[in-house]
Amino acid sequence: MPRLTFINEKQDVNVTQGSNIRQKALDQSIGIYTLKGKLTNCGGYGQCGTCIIEVVEGMSNLSPRTEVEIRKLKKKPDTYRLACQTLVQGNASIKTKP
């Protein structure tokens, strides 16, 4: 079973393969949104870009960037992802609100 490590929160979460990072973070009460994101998030459809995370380890264990992410994150580092668009295939370490 894959494990997500949320570095800022010092929390490990076991997830099933194919799980959505945004949903798993919310299920565990891990805050992935800044104040602005809490007020304006799109509910996980990839339209707002407020659920940005940084992948510290395990990028190869996550789904590839979607077309939405490519557009929304074009000026961001390659280690940034949208939590709502990212599926887990193996272990990864994540920083929320980079």
Image: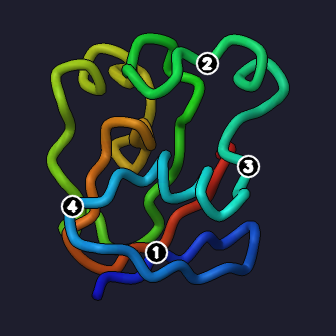
- In this rendering, is residue 29 above or below 56? above
Q: In which quarter of the image is residue 25?
A: bottom right
In space, the residues marked 3 and 2 are separated at their CA atoms by 13 Å
* Secondary structure of residue under mark 2: loop
* Secondary structure of residue under mark 3: loop
Residue at 33 percent across and 80 percent down: it is 91
The first of marks 1 and 3 along the sequence is 1
In space, the residues marked 2 and 1 are separated at their CA atoms by 22 Å
Q: Residues within 10 Å of mark 4 (few under 14, many from 20)?
A: some
Q: Are marks 2 and 4 in contact (CB under 8 Å)?
A: no
- Amino acid on which disc 1 is placed: Leu
The first of marks 4 and 1 along the sequence is 1
Q: Do the residues labelled 3 and 2 touch (CB within 8 Å)?
A: no
Q: Name the residue under label 2.
A: 41
Q: Mark 1 points at which residue?
A: 4
As drawn, the residue found furthest toward the front would be 27
- Amino acid on which disc 4 is placed: Gly
